[in-house]
Structure formats: C-alpha cells, structure tokens
Amino acid sequence: MPVLIILYFRGMSILVMPLRPGPTQGDVMVNMLRPIRSFALVPLIVAAALCLSGCFVGDDDARERDSAVKGVSIKPVRNDREAMAAFDLVNDERARKGMRTLRRRGDLDAVAYTHARDLMRMNRLSHTSSDGRQLENRLARLDWEWAGENLARNKGFDSPSQEAVKGWIASPKHYENMFRPDFSEAGMAALYDPDSGFTYFVQIFIIPVA
C-alpha cells in the first residue's frame, strides 16, 4: 500500500513525501500539529517529489454535471458501521499495549465527516481542504492542546476499516498518532464514494485543554 506523509511543525508543513510509488488501491496520510495560537509560525518547508497542488480533479459542480450526464451518482454514502469498526480497531490495538482507550466525541466525528466528504469530492487525500483550510482551522471552534489526523482510502476489500487501520499501523507516523499516550479523545468518519468505489476514512485525535 503506498503511503503519503505530511508532518506539521508548529502549524507549518515541513515534509511531503511518497514512501512507496506505484498504482494505488489504498492510501493513507498522516498529520500531527500544535495549535498555531500557542506558537509563532516557523517558515520551514522541505519539499519532496510529490506535488499535491497538481492532484485536483476539478470543481465539484463540473464533476457533478459530468456524472449526471453519464447517469452516475456521486452522492456520498455515510458508513457509520465502518467508522465504528475502525474506531474500535484502533482502541483494541491501544488496549493490547496497556494504553487507555480513546473517548469518541460527536463534534470530532462531525469535523472528520466534513473533511471526508471534501476528500471524496476532490478525489484525493490531503490535510488541506478544498477551501485551503488546515486541521487547526477545521478545529478552530473546539478547545485542544495538540491534534493529529490520520487519513486513508481503499477499495475492493471485504473490510475497508480493517485495511485502513492495517495501513496506519504499518506506517511509523500514523502509528505514532494511534499510540500517542496523551491523545485521549478522537473522532472518526467513514464515507463511501459510489462513483470511484473508494471508502474514505478520517480519524482526528486531540489532547483536550486541561
């Protein structure tokens, strides 16, 4: 499974790199950051051989018009069962390591779902939304100290949630988010795209304000 990683240092992207080239049946992406309200931004950007800005498919209206002509629906299908399964799998892995399990929050689920829907419309994985917002912007109405985000999409598997979590475990930076001991609360969303066949997963982790 190809793995994409984006790391954040004090709100700034410092590394973008593909770990495995080749055709994609499943993808995962990771993000961890601190709120920009707590630190001055550090303008350090290290570019690698992946250009995210070249991965846009086009505007949503154009895609919807094209799909309507072809008779294909692109309305997302919210898959709460797969979201719950993925969340439980992450907690099962934490419990095996003797760690406390994550508490699921509905407001974090909502933020995750909104971003999953946006990813589906863009037909790609990115921690930047279609309107240019980063994770800290999407969490602006919530109180938190640290935040992290894991992304995945896959198709053609009997258990999309299991495949997503396996991909996160296999990637060191996703693993770091999953098993960070002071992450205590999280949200999860799973969204099926009937147009592409991909199921998108977004998990958001936070350390709440004490």
Image: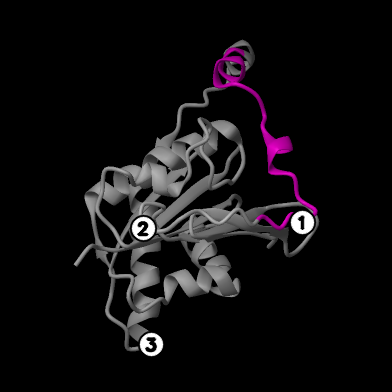
Q: Amino acid at mark 3?
A: Lys
Q: Is residue 190 above or below residue 85?
A: above
**Mark nearer the N terminus (1 vs 3):** 1
Residue that protrudes farthest toward the left in the picture: 210
The answer to whether 139 is drawn above or below residue 46 in the figure is above
**Which quarter of the picture shows residue 27?**
bottom right
Tell whether 121 sits left or right of 185.
right
The residue closer to the viewer here, 10 or 179, is: 10
Please tell me how crowded label 1 is: few (under 14), some (14-19), or many (20+) other residues with Cα within 10 Å: few
Q: Which mark is residue 38?
A: 2
Whether residue 138 is situated above or below residue 89 in the rendered picture? above
Of pointers 1 and 2, the one earlier in the residue sequence: 2
Residue 46 is covered by the magenta coloring = yes
Q: Which residues are magenta?
A: 45-65
Q: Residue furthest front?
A: 40
- SS for tag 2? loop
User: Which residue appears at 67% of the width and 32% of the height?
Assistant: 56
User: Which corner quadrant holds the N terminus?
Assistant: bottom right
Name the residue that disc number 1 marks. Answer: 48
Decide which of 203, 127 is in the foreground and name it.
127
Which one is in front in this view, the residue at disc 1 or the one at disc 2? 2
* Residue named by callout 3: 97
Q: CA distance from mark 1 to mark 3?
A: 34 Å
Q: Choose mark 2 or mark 3, whichever is in front.
A: 2
Q: CA distance from mark 1 to mark 2?
A: 28 Å
SS class of the residue under badge 1?
A: loop
Q: Where does residue 199 sit, x and y in percent of width and height? A: 51, 46
Of the residues shown, which amino acid type is indicated by label 2? Ser
